[in-house]
Image (spheres, coloured by chain):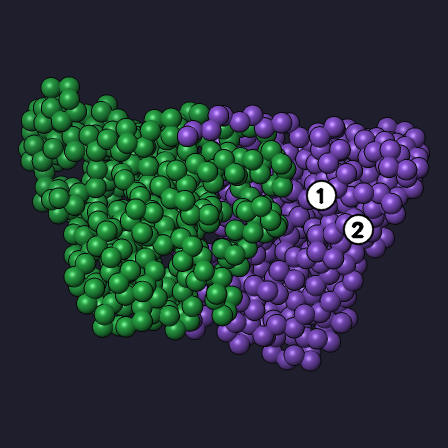
Chain colours: A purple, B green
């Protein structure tokens, strides 16, 4: 029995992703389909490749979009770089670091986990000690912007550790790309992947990925084929580069959407876009604190694009999120893993990162908290945010 | 530097996929994004699940769409069902059967390949002998509709073999689903996957997949986690069923497109849709033969949805395909693997399966062949096709 055509409600997407998509990105997906080897489609792929290099700040030849959501980028990077018996050190300060570790184990790696408390960055000194202790580490992995905790781990110290110990550096930039500085070549990162549904503001469905020449050599010198055929980077690159060897039928409409989203990012300009995310994120954080709430991530390491705020004592997590969604049309995220029920995750990513959304959220959340008996100082929150937004 | 917004040319997609998409499917992707745990989005997923069961003719509880193109469905089925050391027999009569075998090897399986000539169906007697010789076979795999050769392998004999030898039966229905009878439960198939960009006429990007209770038991009783984390069916099912455990951010817009495409399939009715594909496919084949061309696939096993035709002596493959594309706006496919340069692959799938497209292709191809010195009898071709189309 056919279902009736559905009309989704309009939501203001302020969770950990997806973020709202620009109308131009949605419209791009209505363009007629082309074959995956049509010369006109190959030009669109080449355009994506060129713009991805610019957005990722890299000259890496191997720069593609894997045919799946952000996690497909993670899986492609990990499964292709890790061979059975390889030593891998993962700096973990949240849910997604642990996911990398699990994938590296499935790839046959000997994995050392270096844990930091959820809400803090990964500790470089402890990681360096672990890398030294393990010896002969092939891959060091961290998450730049932990979507589960709202904390940033600055990349530079880990790049130095990787260089000094002859390891490759993998950096998860799913949540940071397009919203805060990601400088693949300047960092010296070897494998970087992202998603499209965070600060790039395209629908989920393809995952940007880039490999340094060093990492690409490691992939090509594997002694055994990697575990995955679908995400085998040697097969994917042979389709993305001038060889154009058939591997899979590209997700045509998603590639159109990515092309349009990258164009929008570059039209705005990376520096301008980073500054917008910074300004709106700090305004939200100032507002939440002025309302009387406590931010979860460590000061100095708070992501501008994703804010974790502690749920006050006596306030019911799902009741507040449900009312935000159904009465105000605003989606925010609950906690993940050990932070479930303890924090909310509020995203200001891509198209969703606007001054209006900052004020809307503070006002709506403040009212719902007051209904639940928490005396949020809404006026102070709005004042603090407005000041940071420059609307003083 | 941002790229200018591109406007793809309008193509008539008569290759091996993607096929043309219905305007309602393209329009579905412009609907506003929802979060992947939004109750309204979960209802869309449930709708897909119910409609997929109907289209696949199954009551299997585990019926989902994997977050990638058709090959992601193949990888999910193979990697989850095959454990290291498992015996696997693959009946191969084309490119995609070989792909299954390669994936099963990457999963650690002990793979026996049973080869048939490209253009014929898999030989059940030879497969049965191989299954008996191998002993204790866990998985028997075939491709229902070989996109590389245009040949159908009837499923029933293999279901009997699998049952009698205690093996699970995996059937690739990427090219058949929505265009010719696929009856998962009546066949007794245990793992079936498909793509969206063939006879379902949605853009590529998600892959329908269903597992019988027997296959699902085998997945859950694995002793080791499967190779892939991204396509781990136990993790995917936990998101698709009522547990709603976060695993990946669903490709929201692709799921909207799938929902609309499945609605269209069921509005047309499965029997009516199969008959349409049958009529148009046989008309094309009659027309090609009447023009003086030779069909490649064995008579009696020719797919209605994808026709392989031999390239006549002295005719240049790429020149003809290039002229079809650039002068007539028609895409057809070249040969794959050992048929490269020897056949063309002409699809009549989903929205692309129309009487008009049959006549358009015959006329355009006939003219181009005559330019190349092959005396195609265009009038005879059009007459033969018209008669089959019922317009005689």
User: Spatial distance from mark 1 to mark 2, Cα to Cα?
Assistant: 11 Å
User: Is A103 in front, or is A242?
Assistant: A103
Quarter of the N terminus of chain B within the rendering:
top right
Position in image of residue A286 (x %, y %): 87, 41
For label 2, count other residues whose C-alpha is less than 10 Å away and answer few (under 14), some (14-19) or many (20+).
some
User: Is B32 in front, or is A370?
Assistant: A370
Q: Secondary structure at mark 1?
A: strand
Q: Which of the 4 quarters of the picture holds residue A263?
A: top right
Residue located at (41% from left, 41% from top): B53
Residue located at (53% from left, 59% from top): B229
From the viewer's perspective, is residue A332 above or below residue B243? above
Position in image of residue A252 (x %, y %): 43, 39
User: Is B97 in front, or is A230?
Assistant: B97
Give residue A342's mark. Answer: 2
Quarter of the C terminus of chain B within the rendering:
top left
Position in image of residue B328 (x %, y %): 26, 27
Q: Which of the 4 quarters of the picture holds residue B162?
A: bottom left
From the viewer's perspective, is residue A42 above or below residue B245? above
Position in image of residue B345 (x %, y %): 23, 41
Q: Mark 2 belongs to which subunit? A: A
- Tell me if I can see residue B197 in this picture: no
Give residue A333's mark. Answer: 1
Residue located at (21% from left, 33% from top): B278
- Tell me if I can see residue B264 in this picture: yes
């Amino acid at each position: 029995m056919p279902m009736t055509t559905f009309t989704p409600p309009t939501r203001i997407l302020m969770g950990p992703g997806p973020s709202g998509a620009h109308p131009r990105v949605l419209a791009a997906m209505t363009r007629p389909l082309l074959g995956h080897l049509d010369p006109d489609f190959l030009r669109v792929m080449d355009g994506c490749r060129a713009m991805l290099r610019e957005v990722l700040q890299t000259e890496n030849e191997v720069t593609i979009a894997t045919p799946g959501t952000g996690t497909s980028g993670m899986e492609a990077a990990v499964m292709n770089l890790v061979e059975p018996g390889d030593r891998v050190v993962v700096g973990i300060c949240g849910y997604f670091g642990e996911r990398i570790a699990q994938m590296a184990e499935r790839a046959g790696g000997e994995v050392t986990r270096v844990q930091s408390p959820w809400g803090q960055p990964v500790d470089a000194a402890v990681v360096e000690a672990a890398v030294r202790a393990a010896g002969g580490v092939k891959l060091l992995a961290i998450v730049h912007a932990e979507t589960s905790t709202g904390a940033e781990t600055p990349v530079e110290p880990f790049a130095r550790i990787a260089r000094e110990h002859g390891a490759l550096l993998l950096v998860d930039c799913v949540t940071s790309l397009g919203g805060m500085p990601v400088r693949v070549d300047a960092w010296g990162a070897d494998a970087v992947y992202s998603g499209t549904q965070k600060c790039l503001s395209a629908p989920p469905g393809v995952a940007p990925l880039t490999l340094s020449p060093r990492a690409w050599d490691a992939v090509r010198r594997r002694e055994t084929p990697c575990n995955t055929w679908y995400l085998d980077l040697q097969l994917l690159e042979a389709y993305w580069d001038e060889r154009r060897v058939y591997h899979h039928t590209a997700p045509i409409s998603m590639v159109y959407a990515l092309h349009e989203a990258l164009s929008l990012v570059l039209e705005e300009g990376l520096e301008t876009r980073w500054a917008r995310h910074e300004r709106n994120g700090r305004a939200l954080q100032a507002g939440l604190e002025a309302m009387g709430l406590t931010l979860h991530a460590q000061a100095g390491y708070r992501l501008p694009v994703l804010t974790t705020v502690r749920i006050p004592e006596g306030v019911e997590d799902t009741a507040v999120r449900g009312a935000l969604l159904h009465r105000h049309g605003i989606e925010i995220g609950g906690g993940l893993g050990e932070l479930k029920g303890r924090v909310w995750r509020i995203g200001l990513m891509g198209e969703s990162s606007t001054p209006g959304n900052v004020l809307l959220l503070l006002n709506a959340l403040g009212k719902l908290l007051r209904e639940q008996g928490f005396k949020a100082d809404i006026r102070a929150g709005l004042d603090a945010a407005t000041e940071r937004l420059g609307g003083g």
